[in-house]
Each structure stands twice: as structure tokens, then as C-alpha cells.
Image: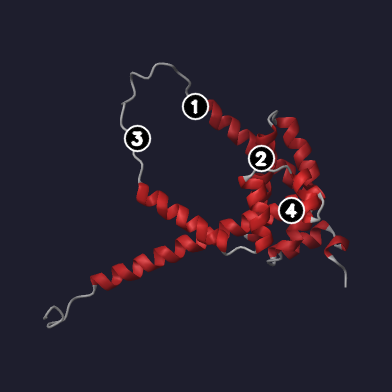
Amino acid sequence: MPTQIDLSDTDLLDAVRAGDTGAYEELYLRHAGAARGLAYALVSDTADAEDLVAETFAKVFATLRAGRGPQLAFRAYLCTTLRHIRYDRLRHERRLELTDDLTRYESGVPFDDTVIDQMERAYAARAFAQLPERWREVLWHTAVEGEPLTLLAPRLGLTPNAVAALAFRARAGLRQMYLQERARDAGDVRRHAATCRRPLRRGQLDG
């Protein structure tokens, strides 16, 4: 039976659409270098380039899981998507108005909803706790500590490219678990609201 390394890009694309995230990891390993090279040609900042690559792979992954996207020529599709994301960012940046004259804007007091902030942190913490230990480890070192892949790779016994692929899968898993946590709480709220809307029967309030 052929392994994922032996499969063509077309076969891997079909596997991703069928729900195989490991197939997308193999596509990442094959084409991340080309995407990264293009990103570095389009932006000068290293962090911006890496963020551009990550967003591109995430967007293409979502497209494939929705049953759309390329049937072949994955690298060309990937690079085209990366360019479009970069151009969209540029258009957004150009729409921003830079001015020192703030007198025409209202000087309101910033509003911070501490309850919502606490809820969001709780969702993220619960989602993170449910991830596999290896995913938590790579997320902590890359996203929190900001450790370079070249330093992290030997400690994990992987190549830098493999660590990048693992980090991508971990971020995708964290995003999915986070959304599930939010959806679960939203469902609890809806059920509670439905219970509160039920008409009271005679005698329910009697002591």
C-alpha cells in the first residue's frame, strides 16, 4: 500500500477533501518552501512573511475541506492564493487614513468588557487543554515563547519543516476546539433561555 510520500499531489488533494489532515501535512511539507520564498519576495518583514504563509495554508485547507479548490497544480493554486491575500492586505492598508488631526473624532472612553474577555480566555484554555500533548508543546514554544523552528526541531527530534507542519496542524486543531467550546456554551445558553420561556403551570411558584 503506497504511503503519503508516494502519492501524487492530486491523490493527496482528494484525501484532504475526504477528511485526511495528514495528507495536507504532506502537501505542506512539499510546498511550504515555495510559498515561503514567494512570501519573502512580497514582504520584507520575516514575521509578516511567515504569517502570510500560515494564513495561505489555512485558507487553502478550509477551501479543500469544503470540497472546493484545485484538482491539480496545487503549488500554482497555493501561490496564487498567497498573492491574493497579500494584495487584499495592501488594499486594506491603503484604505486606512493616516492623520495627526484627531479633533474631528470623538474622544470617548475605551470600553473593555472584562466578562467577555474572561469568557474568551476560558474558551481558549479549555481548547488548549484538550489538544494532544505534542500539539500543546509545539504551540507553546512557537506561539508563546516565539522559539525559532531551527532551535525547536532538535528537541522534538524533527526537521524544521516537520515542526512547521506540526505547528500548522496544532493551530488548526486549537481553532477547531476553540470553536467547539464556544458553540457548546452557546448551546447551553439557548437551552437555558428556552427553559426560561416555558409558561409556568399553576402551583409551580407555591412555596
**Closer to the N terminus: mark 3 or mark 4?**
3
Left or right of 12, for residue 48? left
Q: Secondary structure at mark 1?
A: loop
Q: In the rendered image, which quarter is residue 206 located in? A: bottom left
Q: Amino acid at mark 4?
A: Ala
Q: Residue tagged by mark 2?
A: 52
Q: Secondary structure at mark 4?
A: helix
For the C terminus, give its image quadrant. Answer: bottom left
How far apart, in angstroms, are the residues tagged by discs 2 and 3? 30 Å
Q: Amino acid at mark 1?
A: Leu
Q: Which residue is mark 4?
A: 165
Judged left or right of residue 17, residue 202 is left
User: Which marked residue is nearer to the observer: mark 2 or mark 3?
Assistant: 3
Q: Is residue 194 above or below residue 99?
A: below
Gap in angstroms between the C-alphas marked 1 and 4: 34 Å
Q: Which mark is residue 141?
A: none
Is residue 70 or residue 33 the one in the foreground? 33
Mark 2 vs 3, N-terminal side: 2
For the residues labelled 1 and 2, say whether their Cβ atoms are less than 8 Å apart: no
CA distance separating discs 2 and 4: 15 Å
Residue 34 seen in render: yes
Rendered location of residue 70, percent (x, y):
73, 53
Q: Amino acid at mark 3?
A: Pro
Tell me whether the residue at label 2 lies in contact with that at label 4, contact meaning CB atoms closer than 8 angstroms.
no
Query: Who's the residue at 33% across and 18% down the image?
Result: 103
Give the spatial CA distance, label 1 vs label 3.
20 Å
Q: Earlier in the sequence, mark 1 or mark 4?
A: 1
Q: Nearer the viewer, residue 133 or 94?
A: 133
Question: Badge 3 is on which residue?
Answer: 110
Question: Given the image, on which type of amino acid does mark 2 rest?
Answer: Leu
Q: Quadrant of residue 38?
A: top right
Q: CA distance from mark 3 to mark 4?
A: 39 Å
